[in-house]
Every structure is written in C-alpha cells, then in structure tokens.
Image (spheres, rainbow, N blue to C red):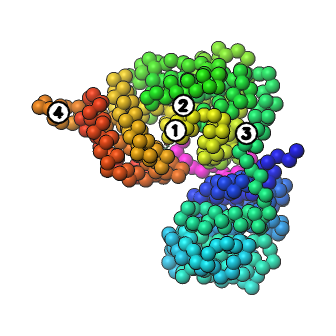
Amino acid sequence: MARIADEKVLVLDFGSQYAQLIARRVRQQQVYCEIVRHDLAAERIRALAPLGIILSGGPASVYERGAPKCDPAIFRLGLPVLGICYGMQLACEVLGGRVQSAPAREYGRAHCRIIEANELLAGIPAETEVWMSHGDQVSEVSEDFLPLAATDTCPVAAVKHRQLPVYGLQFHPEVTHTPQGSQILANFLTDVCRCAGTWKLGDFARETVEDIRCRVGERRVICGLSGGVDSSVTAALLAEAIGTQLSCILVDNGLLRKGEAESVIQEFTDHFHTDLHVVRAEDKFLSALTGVIDPQEKRRRIGHAFIECFSAEAAGIKGARFLAQGTLYPDVIESGGARDGPAATIKLHHNVGGLPEDLAFELIEPLRDLFKDEVRTLGLRLGLPEDIVWRHPFPGPGLAVRCVGEVTRERLDILREADAIVVAEVKRAGLYRQTSQVFAVLLPVQSVGVMGDARTYADVVAVRSIDSEDFMTADWSHLPYDVLARISTRIINEVKGVNRVVYDISSKPPATIEWE
Ligand code: XMP
C-alpha cells in the first residue's frame, strides 16, 4: 500500500523566516511537505521523489558572494519549481534573468496587476493585494521567461519559464496579507504539480498507531506528561496504539497553573485509563528553590529536581523499554535533526523540562513530522478536551520563572490565583485563541495603596499577553481596556496581598516573553 506521505512537496530553505509557514500552507492543502537544505543535491531530490519543489525566500542577495545557491541541476529534473522572493530571484538568475537591487526596498502591501493568468494565477482577480518583503528584484528576464504579474515598483512580480515548469513569485503567497496566496499555492500544487491532496491527519494517525504497535510489540512505553498540548497528544496517541502498555508520569512540582495537574490526571485516568504515576514533589522543588532568586539558578535546580523525580519513578516501572516524547517538526528542523533538513538555527535553548539523552530508553517521537496546528487537530480527533488542546505554552520551570524573586508557597499561591483570573477573563472575552500566551507575573515589589480607610503595602502583579507566530518574536497584545479593567479589578479584589496590577507593553525582542 502506498504511504500517504508518498505524495510530497519539498521546500528548499534559503534561511527564510517563512520556510515553516510555507510548509504549513502546503499541508493545509492536504499535500505533505518537508523542509530540506537549500543545497540538497539534485540526485537526492530525485530519490526523494517529490511532486514539486518550492524555493523559499531568504535574507541574502543572489549576486552577493557566498549567497546560498541550490544545485542548478534541480531545474532540469522535470519537476515543477516555484521560487518565492529570493527563490524566484535565484531561479531567474540561474536560468538567465537579471537580478538587481530594487530602487526602494519594498516592504508591506502592494497592488498587483495580473498580466497573464496562466495555470499559476488562474482564478485570481486581475488586480489583487500582495505582501512584499524584498530589497532585490528581478529587473530583466530573458526571452525564456514570461512575466505574469507586476506592481508599480516591481515589473516582474510573477514569472513563468516558457519551456520548463519553473515559476516565480516576488511576493509572499504564504502570509495572510496576500489574500489570494492560498489560491495561488493551491494552483501550483494541483494544476502544476498534479497533487491529488492525499495528506490527511486521520491517515497519519492510523499509520503512526500501526508503526508504534509494530515497534513496541509487547513491551512498555513511558511518557512524561507536563500538562501541555504536545505531551498530552503524544500520550493520547500512544494510549490509542498500545493501551495498557503505556505508563505516564506526571511530576507535580508545585509550579503548575491552577487546576492543571487535576485536569491532566482526570483526563488520563478517567478518559484514557492509562497507568498514570503522579509524583507529588512540591516540597522537594520548593526546598530546592529556597533562597534562590537568580533565574538561571532556578532553572538549573528545577531541571535537576525534575530529572531526579522522573528517573526514580521510571526506574520503578518494570519492563519499560521506550520513552515517548512530544518533539514537534519545528523542533526537529531548528535543531538540525532532520536527515535532509537545514543546519541548526541558532536559537536560545530552554533546556529545562527536558531529560538527559543517556536515559536507558529508546525514544519514540510520534509527532516529529507535525506542526503545532496539526498536533492540536490530532489531539481533538483523539478525544482530548479543547481546554488541553488549546492551552497556551507554559515553560518547563513553570510559575517559578514568573515569581520574580524568591519562590515560596505563599507567593506561588498568590500568583496562581492572579494567573487564573487573567486566563479566565481573556477566555470570557473570547480572546484566548487569538492571543498566543497570556499570564500573570508576581513582582518582588510592594507598593502603597489604600483599601477602605486603611493604607496597604502589598504586592504588584504584572499581566503579560503576547501575540506571536513562532515565539521567537512577539508583540504585546492590544487587549481591550475593558478586559484589562476587569482583570485588574478582580485581581485586586479577590487575591489577598495584591493592591496593584500593571500591564506589560514590551515586545520581543528586546524583551523576552517570560520575565525570567
Ligand atoms: P522567552 O521567554 O524566551 O520564551 O521569550 C519563548 C517561549 O518559550 C517558553 N519557555 C520555555 N519553555 N522550558 C520550556 O519548555 C523553559 O525553560 C522555557 N522558558 C521559556 C516561553 O513560555 C515562551 O513560550
């Protein structure tokens, strides 16, 4: 039987911030898509047998020394190629066009006129908005190319080679600011690459379940649950595959959000009936944190305590041979862990909450081909509740890095209550899914207030809400004033020990999302 991922498209990554977005957009058209190194040899690409190739954008100029190039033989494989931005400039340069620095760097919305509505631009209105982000553009194309579209400042905004199935777009079809972008990608996939659209998450889940059963046989798998989406979906998938051969471990470190441990415990006992081991370790973590205010030291100690708790519990589970982890495709790509994938990107690594590599288990990573949105959809299909599936990310060291200053039980309780109010009010306003991460931070600051007739001197809570695509950059959310007002009133009225609430209006960079 053919595997679903047999019908696939490759994205050659030239360092674009949008490479993963392109791959996600392709998968949204039910075509499996992988990101590979920009210089993957044509022979290797032929062996991978994609139905088409997309060349991503990238920050370099094609005429610069050392600019990333693809193997020019890829244009002669007979495969459809779509170059986007830098990818188009590269394709045109290799095949006889001329690329120049644009008179003005073009960034943002542009008005695009279709000159030639061929298969790539079929069904697109004659005039449409597109999103540009480039400093160079193709200034001239040889006779071999047919210009398909133009903007006021960009004479070749879309192009097609007359003999080869090679296409280019100067603008970005993958971003939502190009409203017709998905139609253009769909045209490329369906009418140019002849993809039938066989990539379905349901099939993926079935195949993965089969693979896990084959690999595991009669043996036992351990899965750490953190309360987050990725580990929950991993565990749910394993529960489906191997049922009672799965043992889950939840380390309750006393640093989780309000109700988080309980909801995970309920889900994985009542619903999935897994062999769930809850390690109650609040005291251990709190004593490890006594007197510590340095954020790195907090992370280090929490990391150690976690490994100790997890390993001790795992050692007591007889016959366990495998360890399941919720690694996702972006982690695999960014860590340089994919076979033909790009080199590791330099990224600040948060290695708290992870396990050392030398644990004596074989790893099972059933989500390593999936993006976050696919993981969420899969979670819902597997029967996980929306509350878990849509939960915002939460750092491994938990509330400890949101309790600025010393971490004590009392301060954690204050923070947990304030945080629950922030989340509840954002949910009540219907904004939880529009925001990427919303939470409270307890500051090591007391301020003067007045309650009734009495002067108070109490804690300050900061509210943080951010919008982000990938958590590498983020904007603070422009939450409506009335939502902020309700959050503030409720925290000050309901959380004893807090008399002031402030809103964090810092973007990342230069601020990080977490305060510590
Ligand atoms: P920063 O604060 O670096 O956070 O802007 C980026 C994203 O990473 C999360 N984060 C962590 N995740 N272990 C994790 O698993 C950690 O130690 C950790 N620290 C930060 C943070 O919540 C945000 O989503």
Q: Are marks 4 and 3 in contact (CB under 8 Å)?
A: no
How far, Cα to Cα, is label 2 from label 1? 9 Å
The residue tagged 1 is 391
Which element carries disc 3, helix, strand or loop? helix
Magenta segment, which residues?
339-352
Magenta: main secondary structure equals loop
Looking at the picture, which amino acid does disc 3 mark?
Answer: Ala
Which element carries disc 4, helix, strand or loop? strand
Residue 216 drawn in magenta? no
Location of residue 386 in the rendering, given as x and y in whole percent from the top left corner: 55, 38
Along the viewing direction, whichever of 168 and 496 lies nearer the viewer: 496
Q: Would you say the beta carbon of the disc 4 residue lies within 8 angstroms of ligand 1?
A: no
Residue 102: which numbered mark, if any? none
Disc 4: CA contacts within 10 A as few (<14), some (14-19) or many (>=20): few
Residue 451: which numbered mark, if any? 4
Location of residue 472 in the rendering, given as x and y in whole percent from the top left corner: 51, 50
User: Is 213 displayed left or right of 330 in the figure?
Assistant: right
Choose the circle earlier in sequence order: 2 or 1: 2
How far, Cα to Cα, is label 1 from label 4? 35 Å
Looking at the picture, which amino acid does disc 1 mark?
Answer: Arg
- Asked whether residue 404 is in view, the answer is no
The residue tagged 3 is 205
Which element carries disc 2, helix, strand or loop? loop
Q: Quadrant of residue 175?
A: bottom right
Choose the circle earlier in sequence order: 1 or 3: 3
Along the viewing direction, whichever of 165 and 1 lies nearer the viewer: 1
